[in-house]
Amino acid sequence: MRDGLQVTKDQTPKDLGRVWEAVLASSSQNLGRDCVEQWIRPVKLKAVESDLAIVAAPTHFMADWIERNYGLHLLRSLQALMPGIRRIDVIVATGDMPTATVTAMPAATPAQPEPQARQPGPVAVPLPAAPGEALESAPLDPRFTFDRFVVGKPNELAHAAARRVAETCDASFNPVFLYGGVGLGKTHLMHAIGHHLAETRPSARVLYLSAEQFMYRFVQALRFRDTMTFKQQFRSVDVLMVDDVQFICGKDSTQEEFFHTFNALIDQKKQIVISGDRSPDLMDGMEDRIKSRLQWGLVVDIHPTNYELRLGILQTKADAMLAGAPDVVLDPKVLEFLAHRISSNVRVLEGALTRLFAFAQLVGRRIDLDMTQECLSDLLRSAERKVSIDDIKRKVCDHYRLRMSDIVSARRARAVARPRQVAMFLAKQLTTKSLPEIGRGFGGRDHTTVIHAVKKIEELKATDPQLAEDIELLRRMLEA
């Protein structure tokens, strides 16, 4: 192969295709198949001109990523097949023609095994998107649609808000800020909005990206001294969705640009959807002016899942998996068991079910409780993290904005007594401590005080939905 390939100016597409297939084969051994399938295979060898190989990537972002992370690898792989090559250009192609050169990677010569640092010169390196070109949205997961989102009490408001954004054009709630813990459905809803808009309003310019990608593109704009193009591109969209905005906390320059982009889109009555892991006012390192703007519109807290919602999610996922694996037999009690035992994270919950199906298909066993405990023993052990009375007191004090000294004091004002009763109730539910031990943990109280607190909270839960929700939220946080 090496001797049969020559560096000429009239390489045919067939010749170039043979060379590139050989590069893919060697890359699979050196980089791994997954890496090649995701990053290298979409790239094509377009031409060989003298000592220069030109390869084309489908997008500006991918071209820049390939150049920074795999440029040297591709150069050496091509040199092994075509020794005359000394340089490689990663370009962005539209159809069969290149539209912009990202960079030229100098070759490594025998006397210089590693490439020298790139010298400053007139090499044009444009932004991830060319002037006037629409920014490309991050890929949307085809699984994350409204049809596959299981709605329950903890997430019904977030689901309704996302539906409103996707189905109307008036930006009546702007911005929409979704926040909650890991694996509660924030990203799912944002992807669902993107899918729905693509189907119903294909002409709308919708941009979804993570806050990290926003920062990366802004840094690229600063690096290449073309912030005006960056501003024009981000401010020309109809719907902007930024995921995990907490990532830009403490990054002053990125926050400055985000602030101006936010204001420009709001002034144009363009829809903004943002997600974070906590409410805006609790984001340390976020500028106050951005916090206030994030709270302008609709702020939605996605609560930790309750048992009913977790069971619904499992049933939906199990139905889809059984349709693709008709030979698997699933005991319905397994879903109830998992919904009870794994409460911290929906991703972990779904991952547990996926593991069970894989195990059942590989060993040909029925999915029952015995098999579940055997297959998920490590996961179930981690879900049984021990909760201490001190943990409970801290969480309850944080939730009700009390000091630790208040909850163990002799004060009997309702603002202190009710949270204290809630904490005793949770201590009885979540720990193995005896009633006298619980009483001692709350300022040396008698066990009869603990009994009274538990009974009182049980009665109030039946008539006070807000208290019941508070207790459920606290329990989920303690078990997380």
Image (spheres, helix red, strand yellow):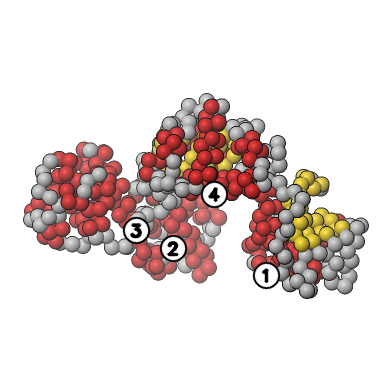
Judged by depth in the image, the label closer to the viewer, 2 or 4, is 4
What's the residue type where badge 3 is placed? Arg
Q: Nearer the viewer, residue 179 or 217?
A: 217
Looking at the rendered structure, which numbered label has been put on residue 367?
2
In 3D space, how far apart are the residues under numbered discs 1 and 3 (Cα atoms)?
A: 42 Å
What's the residue type where badge 2 is placed? Ile
What's the residue type where badge 4 is placed? Glu
Looking at the rendered structure, which numbered label has been put on residue 212?
4
Q: Which residue is mark 1?
A: 30
In 3D space, how far apart are the residues under numbered discs 2 and 3 (Cα atoms)?
A: 16 Å
What's the residue type where badge 1 is placed? Asn
Identify the residue at horizontal 49%, vertical 40% (top origin).
274
Determine the secondary structure under disc 4. helix
Judged by depth in the image, the label closer to the viewer, 2 or 3, is 3
Is the residue under label 1 in contact with that under label 2 (CB below 8 Å)? no
Q: Position of residue 350 (x, y in %)?
A: 45, 55
Q: Nearer the viewer, residue 147 or 167?
A: 167
In 3D space, how far apart are the residues under numbered discs 3 and 4 (Cα atoms)?
A: 34 Å
Determine the secondary structure under disc 2. loop
Looking at the rendered structure, which numbered label has been put on residue 341?
3
Identify the residue at horizontal 21%, vertical 62% (top origin).
432
